[in-house]
Image (tube, coloured by chain):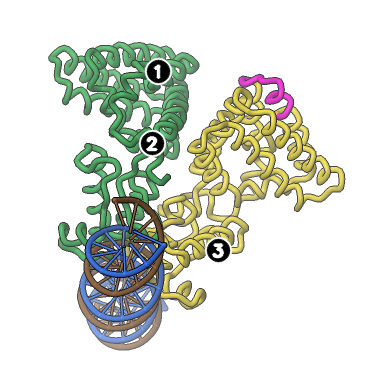
Chain colours: A green, B yellow, C blue, D brown
Amino acid sequence: MAGERVIELVRILEQEIVTGVLAPGERLDEASLATRFGVSRTPVREALNQLASTGLVEVRPRRGAAVAAPGLKELLEMFEVMAELEGLCGRLAARRMSGEERAALEAAHEACQACTEQGDSDGYYGANVAFHEAIYTGCHNRFLAEQTRALRNRLSPYRRLQLRRVNRIDESFAEHEAVLAAILAGDADEADRLLQSHVTVQGGSFADFVANLPVGSDRQATA
Amino acid sequence: MAGERVIELVRILEQEIVTGVLAPGERLDEASLATRFGVSRTPVREALNQLASTGLVEVRPRRGAAVAAPGLKELLEMFEVMAELEGLCGRLAARRMSGEERAALEAAHEACQACTEQGDSDGYYGANVAFHEAIYTGCHNRFLAEQTRALRNRLSPYRRLQLRRVNRIDESFAEHEAVLAAILAGDADEADRLLQSHVTVQGGSFADFVANLPVGSDRQATA
DNA sequence: CAAGGCATTTTTGTATGCAATTACAGATTG
DNA sequence: CAATCTGTAATTGCATACAAAAATGCCTTG
């Protein structure tokens, strides 16, 4: 399944959804996308199906596809699970990371530090991803890493809202430092706990998070 | 997407995979399935894609689909994550279950007891599912419940091997009893811990588990 | 007899066409 | 004037047709 063209379509659409070019709730009709990408409806359908399986788009039978617009309740549920998964990654990483992997994590942390000191918030976004990726690698559980990455990706449109908060970068970096210390010390419980609170909404202001949500996210799109 | 026919195909194929009618590694070519179900290849393709997204089948570009045959390492990774998810469900359920939900859990447990006393191992399989479903409901996190259910389903071909062990039913029931007690007592940590060990391979004999694996599961099918 | 190359055959990937369902708009009626 | 009904347009679901790639078997050749 999934020829090269389909994979490319998935990649492009996923990127546009994750970065917010395609807003939650926006309709994705097959014909338009097919014309836009210069292919037939068939690969577009497959791409939409794949995106639906990751949860990024929502398809309702006979009613077409749209960028997923989870309600507030569902978002909180997903954050709750993500916190647990990230924590587990950290817990396992603290126990299992090799010397090289620990060095890579430190390097990623230093890249974050560089961005922080220069106030490069765009750069920090990427460096932050690299830091967490280093932890995923270090947990030595590819399945867990993939699940966590997928959920992280799915929530990224909403996580970006948080990261834009004033001083959130500095806060995030400070939290990374503690996480790094715990992992290097091999303190699994602490790494778990710190990572959970790091990715949790409650780390910031919950009211701000809700207030910055795109309109319509306060109820189910499928309602 | 996903018309009625596709949904039905997914349901049937999923059932056949989970119950072992279709063995891990078995090839699933589109034309044969299309003839068998009396539909064209298009809905079959969609169904296979959906099953691929849940991990039950594996599709390699230009090389067709086959029932997923995860290697031992990957299986252990999945069990590790499932233990965590089940534990989290129990943790949340202990804190959040309503009175009716607690009653339902007790009822499910009693159904398990009936099967145990009558040595009805087939019946126990279903009652066991109901017990865990009651916990999923009680965690009040539909997303988590869905993720856990999906992973449980994906692992069910391998879990059944465990359940067939002598006395495993009795062991399982005794563990349920402890889980039930912890949840009713609102002891979240204990419920978490007990459920994790309940679904973990290490609960039984690891060697037996490995020995009963279908041939070929000791290495990656995609290797 | 074994190994490699070539043609055939099978299977997947994509395009297109048709049928069925749904959304929309205008008209009709209470 | 509001609500409902109906006809039309638009969109999805499925089937079929064609193109491209990979698997298979046979033949040639060393």
Label 1 crowd bin: few (<14), some (14–19), many (20+), radius 10 Å: few
From the top left corner, tell me how far across and down residue A174 is, in percent.
Answer: 30, 11
On the image, numbered disc 2 is attached to which residue? Answer: A151
What residue sits 30% from the left and 24% below the top?
A211
Q: Is mark 3 on a helix, strand or loop?
A: helix
From the top left corner, tell me how far across and down residue A77 is, in percent.
Answer: 46, 31
Against A204, is A36 above or below? below
Residue B12: give its label.
3
The stretch drawn in magenta includes residue A175 = no
On the image, numbered disc 1 is attached to which residue? Answer: A202
Relative to A63, A81 lies left or right? right
Against A195, is B108 above or below? below
Label 3 crowd bin: few (<14), some (14–19), many (20+), radius 10 Å: few
Please report the bounds of the magenta region as a residue range. B180-189
Tell me the quarter of the image containing the C terminus of chain A.
Answer: top left
What residue sits 55% from the left and 32% below the top?
B140
Q: How many labels does the image show?
A: 3
